Image (cartoon, grey):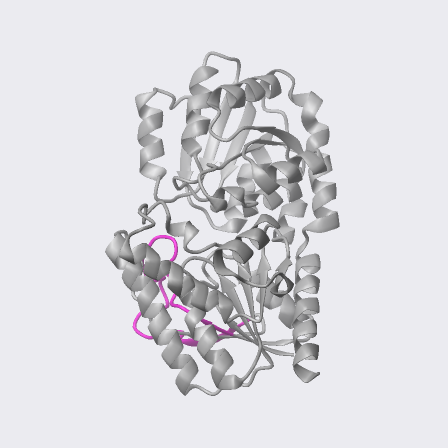
Amino acid sequence: MKILVITQYYYPEPFRITDICEELVNKGNEVTVITGIPNYPDGKIYSGYRRFKKRKEIVNGVNIIRSFQIARGKSSIRLFLNYISFMISASIKVMFKKIDCDLIFVYQLSPVTMMLPAVIAKKKYKRKLFTYSCDLWPDSVKNILKNEKSIIYKLTDKYSKYLYRKSDRIGVTSESFITYFIDKHDIAKKKLVYIPQHAEDIYLDIERPTNNGVVDFVFLGNIGKIQDVENIINAVEIIKQMGKFYVHIIGDGSNFESCVNLTREKKLEDRIGFYGRYPLEKTMKFYDVADICLLTLKNESIVGETIPSKLQGYMAAGRPVIAAISGPAKTLIEESKCGTVVKPGDAISLSKVMAEYILNYEKYLYQGENGRNYFLRNFTKKLYVDRLITEFNIMEENENV
């Protein structure tokens, strides 16, 4: 099958779509990706990609075509220009470039605007469009566009509806998202399918940590307002007088500086360390010391009902999980018996569970094994891509009927 993939982010940026495309190639498919110029997360064009370099390349069998975009920078204005510039340039690329394809696959992260080139490709090539939605719009921008009655929010809502409805089939990362698409965007249930995200195979190489006399908690991933890292900081403040423990926070995001400052204000530098963002291969060293992984998420919108992709990574790594979360992620942790869950935003309950694990760490090692076993049954890359190909084949069969 010849698959045209459209996504704003791709190698060498740290997103799982690269892993997916390469596995599709390994299974005998021909994959062409239209993407942007790498600049995530630092907001600067990567070295080697400036001055029109590497606008076309083949990486591990995947044909990559890069469209112009303005680097995201650090301001909201630059981010807006980044979104719009890719949407326009990739759309022009699709309109004037001949690409032989059997199907179009858009891997939709933020922003939803990255779907427009895929919608144009669908019309031009007369091919079916499969969207895998990792981020729900307009709910994903509710923290920015707080007033749902504002003209900007209404336009964003209307535009999102238009793009989603143009998809022939939509894959979602959580079963609760099916209800969202039905209620919010009036998408027919038969067009929606739940395909859980995978985690990279590299996590399976991680072994049990050695005992260094300290119980090490690790949080990995984006640090935005919705991730509620403040909840972890507040919980640590409650138990700061306990025995030897330390919290490692690896990642970056819009709320990074705020969390660092809050830690300083509470004088918790001897209990919490911030490391910034690392490439996937280098984050593995933190799992070597991780005894327990932390997961927090606010429950302020449908986005709070998601299953964060880091959870699959935690499970694959074989680490017990302590989470302050609700919805499908809570259900998943309880069903797999890979950890303990408290209510979102409840620092007191979170601190009590952390204290229990510090005092009785050995007692909870089995949870890590449970998580890895559950991952192997449900969340491997092979399972994800097999599900994806099944959906692609169904779409092709329906087209030929």
The quarter in which the N terminus is drawn is: bottom right
Locate residue 182 relative to residue 27 in the image: left or right. left
Rendering coords of residue 332 (x, y %): 65, 40
Q: Residue at x 31, y 30 (%)?
A: 261
**Residue at the far top in the pictured view:** 241
Q: Nearer the viewer, residue 376 or 154?
A: 154
Task: Identify the residue at image location x=53%, y=21%.
Answer: 349
Please state the extent of the stretch shown in magenta in the rendering: 33-59
Residue 50 lies in the magenta stretch: yes
Q: Nearer the viewer, residue 393 or 320?
A: 393
Q: Which secondary structure is most common in the magenta stretch? A: loop
Residue at the spot x=67%, y=51% of the render?
379
How many numbered tags mark residues here? Answer: 0
Quadrant including the C terminus: bottom right
Above-or-below relation of 167 to 252:
below
For residue 203: magenta?
no
Counting from the top left corner in percent of width and height, residue 207 is at 67, 38
Residue 7 appears in view: no
Q: Quadrant of residue 191?
A: bottom right
| Residue shown at the point (66%, 57%) measured from the top left | 381
Where residue 83 appears, as percent x and y from the top left, is 34, 63
Q: Is residue 23 visible?
A: yes
Q: Is residue 149 above or below residue 13?
A: above
Residue 196 or residue 383, whichever sits in front: 196
Task: Please state if 178 lies on the left or on the right of 76 as rendered.
Answer: right
Instruction: Judge whether 36 appears above or below 297 on screen.
Output: below
Give coordinates of residue 236: x percent, y percent: 46, 21
